[in-house]
Structure formats: structure tokens, C-alpha cells
Amino acid sequence: MIRKNRLNKIYLIIFFLLSISLVTFFILRALEKNIDLYLTPSDLKAVDFNQPDDFKLGGMVKVGSLEKLGGLEISFVVTDFESEMTVIYEGVLPNLFKENSGVVATGTLNTEQNQFIATEILAKHDENYMPVKIEVQN
Amino acid sequence: MYKYVAKYFIPSKVYKFCSLTAMPAFIIGMITFLLSSYFVIYSLPADVEQQEIYRILFIHVPSAILSELIYLFLAVNGFIYLVWRTKISATFLNSAISIGLIFTAIVLISGSIWGKPTWGTYWVWDARITSTFILLIQYVGLIALRSSFSSRQTTDQILSIVSIIGAVNIPIIKFSVDWWNTLHQNASITTSGSAIDSEMLIGLPLMLASLLFLSFSIFARNIQFEILTRTAKTSAMKEIING
């Protein structure tokens, strides 16, 4: 049997923990869009979209959209399977950057040409790990 | 139930248990660590996408698991200490902080090293990395609190309360990749199975087990130190110390 005063203490701690969790929940809810690392192409298409500064755009590189524009300049289409956005980038690419793979680009939106001018490209890889030799057999 | 558990957690008995098990745990941990390191570096096949660099996973993921589990352990001990006033849980709490700090540092450092060749950056302020960084600050804060009060009892109470509050961060770390857009990928091992191929997966429990043994040996030595500083003057402890 748990003594009465100890039981009260347990209730107190649980109540305390619940209120802390609730506070954290509301803070995180309020910051929801700020905690997101990147915006998706759908976010850019939203009516109230207004972001003049640098921001990050993320999604998948659409299959067959990667083009070399000469030199180190490339263009590709970022998709979240609902909307798309063309990205122009000049510079060094991370190893895992390729078509049909995740990408997070930092840059600005050129609204006239409906292009995203990226200054930095990060590759986002998925959670799957497969041994090399299975691929070779296929 | 209290009286059945409490008799195994008398400081002198815990001290004896720790002095018996610390060295064997260290030896077992070191051997399994070296063997499984050799195994994950040389025997396991490379990954299709990431080639060789994916092997950092085998130190990154077990450390991440341990850094979070140790924090939960702190919070549970803090809870027990606040409710039952058992000094031994305060001892456990004090002894585990530094180990959690080490593993959190390993997670962040190995993640950075892994991030540069795969993502293209050492550091990005996404939800997973930021919340893990907050966990590191929590551990540092707990260590700073340990030496901030003159009374040991006050220290233990404050540490318990702070570790319970901080436990709110653990589910945030765990679910950050699901709740927000992050650069960090989602969890590979979920209730619906593993996205790591079974051939490579075997390295993970091996490394986890070896790190568990190693951290237990450090934990046991820390406990001994804590017990000595707290209760070295009691007759039961004097008997052990003097042989």
C-alpha cells in the first residue's frame, strides 16, 4: 500500500508534469510553422504566401527534371506530389543529390519567372538502408 | 512492494554489487565493442545510397537511444526520490548524468560528421537536431546544478525536479521528425518493421549491447563514488572499506 502523503505527492508530480507538457504543447503549436525547416511547393502556392527574404524550399527532385544549364548551373523541379517549383542553382552539389530523392534548397523566390533561385542545396536522404550487392543482382 | 524492493537497495549492498560488476562489465563491454566495431566496419556490406559513410549509423543510433533512455532514467529516479525520499535513487540520478552527457555529445558530433558528406552541411537548425542540442544543454545544466548548492539534500531535490521537467523534451526529440519538416530522415525502425535491411541491422543491437555494458561500468564506478561521498561514515560502509 502506498501511504496517503506519498500518493498526494505522486498526484502533484503528475499534475505538474501534465501542465508542463500542456505549456510545451501550446508553445510548439504556436511556433509550428517556424519550427518547420522548409516550405513545400504547396506552401508557395498558397494565396497568402508572402516571404520576401531568404527561405528554404524542400521536397523531392522530380524524375527527369534535372537539367545542366552549362558550367555548374543546374535547374530542376521540386515537387511535393501536389505542386511543383522550378529551382535554379549554381554551385557544388552534395553527393546524395539526385532525381527522385529529397532536397532542401535555400534561396529566394523570383515571382516574375516563377523560379526559385537557390544559393545552397542540401540533400535529404530517406530512412532505407540496403546492402550494395542486392542492387547488383537486380 | 516498497519493503521488498528497498532491502536490495541499501547503499552498502549497492556498493558491493558495483565493485563486483564494474570491472567485468568494462571488460565485456570493451571486447564486444571492439568485435562489433570490426564487424560493422569490415564485415557488413556498404549501403546502396550512402556507400561506406552509412557505417556511422552504428555509433550514432545506439548513442541516440542511450542518451534518451538515460534521461528517462534520470526522470524516473527523480520521481522516486521526490515521492519516497530514497537516497539511493538520488545516487543513481547523480551518477548517470555524466554518461548521458557523453552520449548526447557523441550523437551530435557523429551526426555532424555524417551530415557533411550526405546532406552537404555539418549543422542545420531543424527540429531533430535542435531538440537534441537542447538535451545536451539540459545535461550540462544538470551538471552545473550538481555543484551549485551547499546542501546535498537541496541539490538532490532540485536535480529531481529539473530532470522531471526536462523529460518533456524526450518525446519531442523522438517525434520531431514526424511532427515537423526536417532534414533528418524519419525513424528507420518502427513498429511496422525495419527500413534497414536485416543483413545490416544485426550490427545495431551488437553496438547497443556493448555501449550498455561500457556505460554500466562507468555508472557503477560513479555510484561507488557517490555512495562514498555520502555515506562513508556509516558502520556498514566502514566495514566494506576496511575489508
Image (cartoon, coloured by chain):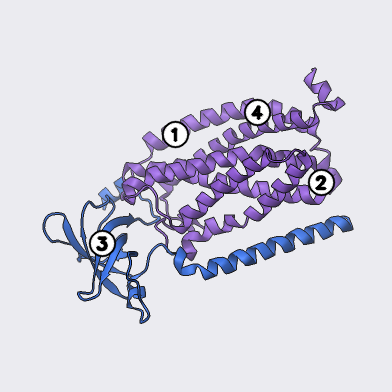
Badge 3: how crowded within 10 Å, few (<14), some, or many (20+)?
many
> Where is mark 4, residue-wise?
B22
Distance of mark 2 from mark 3, alpha carbons? 58 Å
**Which residue occupies 68% across, 40% down?**
B146
> Where is mark 3, residue-wise?
A118
Q: Nearer the viewer, mark 3 or mark 1?
A: 3
Q: Which chain's residue wears label 2?
A: B
Q: Is residue B97 above or below residue A83?
A: above
Nearest the viewer among B145 and B115 is B145
Q: Which chain is purple?
A: B
Res. A82 image quadrant: bottom left
Q: Amino acid at mark 2?
A: Arg
Q: Which chain's residue wears label 1?
A: B
Q: Nearer the viewer, mark 2 or mark 1?
A: 2
Name chain A's colour: blue
Q: Is residue B72 left or right of residue B133?
A: right
Distance of mark 3 from mark 1, alpha carbons? 40 Å
Residue B192 seen in render: no
| Co-location on one chain, circles 2 and 3 | no
Mark positioned earlier in the residue sequence (1 or 4): 4
Distance of mark 2 from mark 1, alpha carbons? 42 Å
Distance of mark 4 from mark 2, alpha carbons? 26 Å
Nearest the viewer among B149 and A12 is B149
Q: Is residue B46 above or below residue B236?
A: below
**Which residue occupies 13% across, 61% down?**
A69
Q: Nearer the viewer, mark 4 or mark 2?
A: 2
Quick one: SS at disc 3? strand
Q: Amino acid at mark 1?
A: Ser
Q: Which mark is residue B37?
A: 1
Q: Is residue B64 left or right of residue B76?
A: left
**Which residue occupies 71% across, 51% down?**
B161
